[in-house]
Each structure stands twice: as structure tokens, then as C-alpha cells.
Image (cartoon, grey):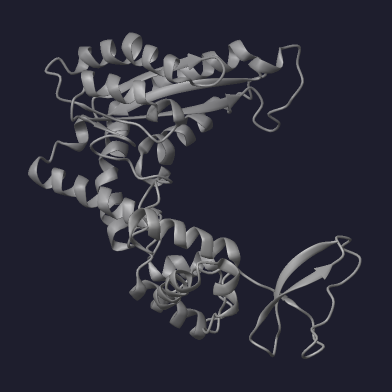
Amino acid sequence: MKKRYNKCEQSSTYCFLTTSTDSFFPPRSCTVCEGPRIPRMPRRLTKNERVHAIELWYRHRDVTMVLQHWELPHRPDRRTIQNLVRRFQSTGSTADRLRPGRPRTIQTPANRERVERDVENHPTQSIRQRSTDLQLTYDSLQRRQFSQWLLAKDQVDPLFVDRIWFTDESRYYYSRTNPHYHVEIPNSRRGLNIWCAISSLGIIGPIFYEGTMTQEKYREMLRVSFFPARRDVDPENTSWLMQDGAPAHTAKTTVEFLNRRLPGRWIGMNGTHPWPSRSPDLTPCDFWLWNELSELVYRDDPRTMPQLEQLIREAVATLSLDTIRNACRSVVQRCRRCIERKGNSVEI
């Protein structure tokens, strides 16, 4: 048997109800209206309720007496009263403590009112579509801020985008129609992990690596492969690096490494210029490079790992500098389109 804290459909009161833990037996009916019990949903106390609770506590000095003398419609439970009193005694305030993590600036009273009004007007609309129509998603806000920043840099320096190295990882299998096509090759080598960097200056890669990209592998790859190759095409050291929010990219040691090698000239999470999450439509590696390589590689339907690796190298070698430059420069147009669409995904 267990206790459930339920609410009567007709009487606006809460009470404890003992029911069986076996899901076969339904909850017992209410003693007031004989109707089914509705589970009580957690809610935060209002300002008046918190003040009322503190006044009752200092008058009676007992949680049970506070609950017995409660005069407002919604009565809290014992633990809520205890936590509220403890917080008031330690901080002198009944306000909630500041929560760690990203601030939820979108949940303002005005926005909550907009959502409530929209629910009344469109009760059957999905949450995803509603958040898109009301433009209240954090990701869309990030995308708009990044697009505005990049367009401002482009207005000051029209060649700014040409100096950005867009980077990404991908995985290719040796059978396009069935990634699990069986050949006598260990499971760990049924696919090839590759990393590339592209900009209007050219392409660096493909760089192949085994297993998961860790922060140690990533920093070593940048130090041994990326920076030397970048120095050959950018001797004045004016180019930037863009990376997404993969764990190896956002690690503290990686951030410190990039701050030493490219101070103020890299784009990514936990950096000075954050890359917006869920934005494959703004990086040419995602919206162009990987699809282009797939079309070239899988024409011959590779069946072995050495054949797949050779085809990937040949496909990268066939990419012309003009094609790469056009793909990288299209990021400016995509950022404009992103702002027009108020942060939503871009299809060009």
C-alpha cells in the first residue's frame, strides 16, 4: 500500500489517499463527489502563500500547527514548509535560490502570457510548432545572435568569411546500401572516421582517426596536422577556426589550447564567439562537404576499408578551390536568411 496526494474534482481540497501499489486496482473514489481522484501536480508557492507560511510558523513554531491554521486555498505539504522556513532563517528571504546553469531568460511573464493566449486560440497545436511560431526557443536566439555577429564582421571586412576554417567530423561506411554488410574485417573498422577543415583558402584533410574523438586526439590532431597545414596557406596567421559543440571541442583543456594558439580567433562553445547549437545549415561541412563526398565515394560502392579510404582521398582531391570557396561564402547568405526566418533552419 502507498499514499497518494490527490485532489477532488469538485471540492478544491487536497487529502492523502491510501491506494494499492498494484496498477490493476484503480484509485479509490473521492468521499465528497464519488468521482475519481486526480493526482496533484507540484507547484511553487506564491509570494502571499510564502509570507503566510512564515507568519504562521513564527506564531506557532510547529509545522503541524501551520497546516492546521492554514487559511489560503492551496495548502503546501510539510516538507515545503520546512524548506521555506530553513531558507528564510539562513538568507532572510523566501525567494528561491539562484539555480546553476544557463539562465532561463525566455520564461518571462510576458512570454508566459503569450503562450497561454496561444494555447487558448490553438489548443491542438504541437509544442514544437508552437515554440517555433512564438520564436521562444533558445536555439533560435543563439542562431540569430551568431548570424548578426557574423554579418557585422562581414560588413566591416568583406573577406572575413574567407579566413574562417570550418571543421567537422564524419563517418563513412564501406557499403552505402547497408553499413553492416559483413566482410572479414573487425567490427571496430567497419567504418572510417574522418575530420576535415575547409575555407576559401582550400581544404585540410581528410584526417583519419580510430575510435571516438577524444580531447587528447583532437588537440594532437590540431597540433600535428591542422596548424602546420594552415601555416602553409596562411603565413600571416590571420585565419580563424570554427568548431561545433562536440565534447572533445568543449573540453577545458581544448579551450585553453585554442586560447593560446588562436587568442580571440576561434568560434565554438565555451569560447569568446560561441557557435550556435543545432546549426548544420550554417557550416559548409554539413550542408555541402559530406554530401558531396558521399556522391563521389559511393559511385564505386566500396566493399573494403582500404578501398573506402582511397576513394575518400581521391574524392577530396577532385574538389576544386572555386567550389569550396563558393560553399564557404554562401554562409553569409545563409546567415541573412536565418535572421529573416527569425532563427529557424535555412534551406537554400
Residue that sits furthest to the right in the current view: 24
**Residue found 44% across the figure and 82% down from its top:** 117
Viewer-proximal residue, 291 or 94? Answer: 94
- Asked if 4 appears above or below 257 in the picture, the reply is below
Viewer-proximal residue, 113 or 336? Answer: 113
Residue 197 visible: yes
- Asked if 1 appears above or below 269 in the picture, the reply is below
- Asked if 117 appears above or below 270 in the picture, the reply is below
> Where is residue 327, by image quadrant?
top left
Residue that sits furthest to the left in the current view: 156
Q: Residue 248 at what x, y percent from top left?
A: 43, 25
Q: Residue 195 at what x, y percent from top left?
A: 44, 22
> Where is residue 157, by image quadrant?
top left
**Residue found 46% across the figure and 79% down from its top:** 116
**Residue found 64% across the figure and 15% down from its top:** 189
The quadrant the N terminus occupies is bottom right
Q: Residue 253 at what x, y percent from top left?
A: 35, 21
Q: Residue 54 at what x, y percent from top left?
A: 43, 70
Side of 102 relative to 272 (left or right): right
Viewer-proximal residue, 1 or 140? Answer: 1
Residue 348 visible: no
Report the label total: 0
